[in-house]
Image (spheres, rainbow, N blue to C red):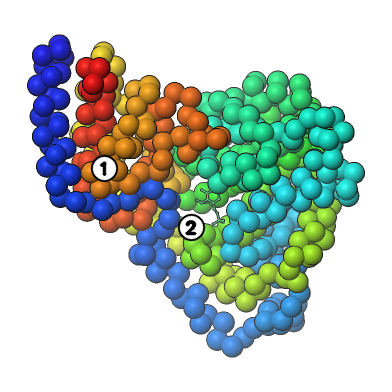
Amino acid sequence: MNDQQLQARHQELRQQYQQVSEQKLNLDLTRGKPSTEQLALSDALDGILGNNYLCEDGSDSRNYGGIMGIPEARKFAAQYLGTTTARVMVGGNSSLQLMYQTVTNAFYHGVRGADSSWLMEAARASGQVKFLCPAPGYDRHFAVCEALNIEMIPVAMTAEGPDMDQVEALVKADPLIKGIWCVPKYSNPDGIVYSDAVVARMANLGKIAGANFRIMWDNAYAEHHLVDNPPELANILELSEAAGTLDNVVVIGSTSKITHAGAGISFIASSEANLAEFGKQLGISTIGPDKINQLRHVRFLKDMPTLRALMQKHRAILQPKFDSVLQALETGLSGKTVAGKPLGTWTKPQGGYFVLFDTQPGLADQVVKLTAAAGVKLTPAGSTYPYGKDPQNTNIRLAPSFPSVKDIEAAMRVFVLCVELATIEKALGL
Ligand SMILES: Cc1ncc(COP(=O)(O)O)c(C=O)c1O
């Protein structure tokens, strides 16, 4: 388009924007939470125990105790995470809380007693504890680091996972880098599945990193597929055992997006020694988890085939929503260029909860602002990066799981309009 054509298109889009703004929409594509329909798939959890509160070892799930989780839930979680029962602990309703506790414990109290505290080590070296943060990534991981004043070092993502050359060089050079956040399957927000080569190199990191390094392997979307033949993720626990680095790996998961997001169960898998230490530290703040809920989950989810059948029902609800987002992007933006460049690029995830959109450089915050003023809330620009700083200002995370298809269609009409409007306004210097 020449300048005149751009001006004309700009006028058209401004008019459309005005009309949309007058509709006073109130739509929200911010957080990746399951819809009411998805939650209802697991309503049979309620009442499933039918007064039978006894666990398989004869203990009463209603009573205190059992810091590691009930035996049948640990067995179930071991299958889910691909490890042995002895290497799994089952917790309460939030894996984020387990992650926060793991990092906080290592930071203040150490992974093997006070001498191994990350904070103490940093003090001895007159330095600061640091974490690698593949970015874009999950904002709540970054919030854990920020809360503890752990310096976050962004690491580039490739189509295969974090840039491992960069990761290895960084950990080799600085022993105060104490961990890395990973969402290895259908990563939040870019939907990437780590390749076998990346997982194998991750499993070796413990050999080159400083003492007490931890890989926070948040496999939140392990079974959350949107395709028929889902990609396989290599088993980091097996690989790290073979490499002698099991202590460096903490695998996390939960049923938040399988059963009830606010009332699921969470899992953590690592070496027996790590779990024993973690159990000891956790035992200071609680006498035990909600074992009734653990029992309800095992009776409801039963085994992996049953869980996978449930995930197919989730997929049936989610798929039309993702299709609707992708369709809107395709029809609204595909093939269009401004200043010789496409209006944006976007992911086509094979699973997980997000579509990641990239605007032309420098426009994400403006697009989010324009959509918000027209009644469509998007995740704040920058939130997929440590300290909220997207260096290119291009990333916008779209989360279509909660709204209805009709609302997504309406929201996406506004979104594509705002992308084109913002891009043209920049090209025109407005
Ligand atoms: C990557 C990732 N990890 C963890 C969570 C939260 O998990 P939980 O509900 O088990 O605390 C989310 C939720 O969106 C997530 O995207």
Q: Which residue does the numbered mark 2 point to in the structure image? A: 257
Report whether residue 81 is seen.
no
- Quadrant of the rendered image containing residue 403: bottom left
- Dot placed on the residue nearer the N-terminal end, 1 or 2: 2
Report whether residue 372 is seen.
yes
| Residue 212 in the image, given as x and y percentages of width and height | 81, 39
What separation in Å lies between label 1 and label 2 (alpha carbons)? 31 Å
Residue 392 located left or right of residue 411 = right
Q: Quarter of the image containing the N terminus?
A: top left
Tell whether circle 2 marks a residue whose Cβ is less than 8 angstroms from ligand 1: yes
Q: Is residue 393 above or below residue 95?
A: above
Q: Nearer the viewer, mark 1 or mark 2?
A: 1
| Residue 207 in the image, given as x and y percentages of width and height | 80, 30
Q: Is residue 24 above or below residue 132?
A: below
Q: Nearer the viewer, residue 371 or 397?
A: 371
- Quadrant of the rendered image containing residue 232: top right
Q: Which mark is residue 373?
A: 1
Q: Nearer the viewer, residue 320 or 119?
A: 119
- Assess disc 1: are there few (<14), some (14-19) or many (≥20) residues with their C-alpha within 10 Å of its C-alpha: some
Q: Quarter of the image containing the C terminus?
A: top left
Callout 2 secondary element: loop
- Quadrant of the rendered image containing residue 245: top right
| Residue 124 in the image, given as x and y percentages of width and height | 87, 33
Q: Nearer the viewer, residue 425 or 76?
A: 425
Q: Is residue 362 above or below residue 196?
A: above
- Assess disc 2: are there few (<14), some (14-19) or many (≥20) residues with their C-alpha within 10 Å of its C-alpha: many
| Residue 142 in the image, given as x and y percentages of width and height | 58, 41
